[in-house]
């Protein structure tokens, strides 16, 4: 019994030529895991079992991925060699970034043309301390000053 091409009955799978072709095609298209299994006409548990008991099934998956990657690399290399210099430059940079993990140098130059005077900084700090003490003393005098009783 099938529901939308999903097999329900339990079956023993073997790595037949047709099954290997289906695995190859799914892997070549970029599918992985459960999606690969379902696309190749298997349930995910059947795919895992087939991988364990028949290593040629996993080899078909690897070959599908490798052939797909080779096709993509060929397209990129043709673009790099193209007479369109803009396309060639963009594709060369992309290949460097993704295939060779190249990162463009990020450089930031910060020029500070200011001199710091230690004696000037100490003088400013001394003034701030004096002002803080003056403020504290003024607050203390205001808090302890007797209330003006002339209004009474």
Image (cartoon, rainbow, N blue to C red):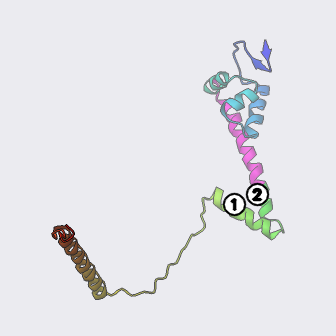
106 with respect to 118 (left or right): right
Q: Residue 141: horizontal and vertical position, in percent? A: 18, 73
- Looking at the picture, tell me which residue is in the foreground, 152 or 69: 152
Instruction: Characterize the local packing of mark 1: few (<14), some (14-19) or many (20 or more) Cα atoms within 10 angstroms.
Output: some
Instruction: Characterize the local packing of mark 2: few (<14), some (14-19) or many (20 or more) Cα atoms within 10 angstroms.
Output: some
Q: Give the residues drawn in magenta, as a range.
A: 53-74
- Looking at the picture, tell me which residue is in the foreground, 123 or 133: 133
Q: Quadrant of residue 131?
A: bottom left
Judged by depth in the image, the label closer to the viewer, 1 or 2, is 1
Do residues under tags 1 and 2 come within 8 Å of each other at their CB atoms? Answer: yes
> What predominant SS class does the magenta segment belong to?
helix
Residue, disc 1: 94
- Looking at the picture, tell me which residue is in the foreground, 118 or 111: 118
Query: Would residue 132 be counted in the magenta stretch?
Result: no
| Residue at horizontal 69 percent and vertical 60 percent from the top | 94
Residue, disc 2: 76
Q: Residue 21: horizontal and vertical position, in percent? A: 78, 31
Q: Is residue 104 above or below residue 46?
A: below
Q: Secondary structure at mark 2?
A: helix
Q: Residue 71: horizontal and vertical position, in percent? A: 77, 49
Q: Is residue 98 above or below residue 118?
A: above
| Residue at horizontal 79 percent and vertical 55 percent from the top | 75
Query: Would residue 68 be counted in the magenta stretch?
Result: yes
- Mark 1–mark 2 Cα distance, whole angstroms, equals 9 Å
Q: Quadrant of residue 146?
A: bottom left
The number of numbered badges drawn on the structure is: 2
């Amino acid at each position: 019994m099938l529901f939308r091409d999903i097999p329900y009955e339990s079956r023993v799978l073997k790595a037949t030529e047709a099954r290997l072709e289906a695995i190859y095609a799914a892997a070549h298209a970029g599918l992985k895991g459960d999606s690969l299994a379902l696309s190749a006409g298997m349930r995910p548990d059947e795919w895992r079992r087939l991988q364990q008991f028949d290593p040629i099934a996993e080899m078909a998956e690897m070959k599908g991925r490798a052939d797909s990657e080779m096709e993509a690399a060929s397209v990129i290399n043709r673009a790099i060699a193209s007479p369109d210099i803009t396309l060639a430059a963009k594709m060369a940079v992309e290949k460097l970034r993704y295939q060779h993990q190249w990162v463009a140098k990020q450089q930031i130059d910060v020029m500070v043309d200011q001199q710091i005077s230690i004696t000037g900084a100490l003088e400013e700090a001394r003034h701030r301390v004096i002002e803080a003490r003056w403020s504290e003393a003024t607050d203390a005098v205001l808090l302890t000053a007797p209330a003006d009783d002339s209004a009474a």
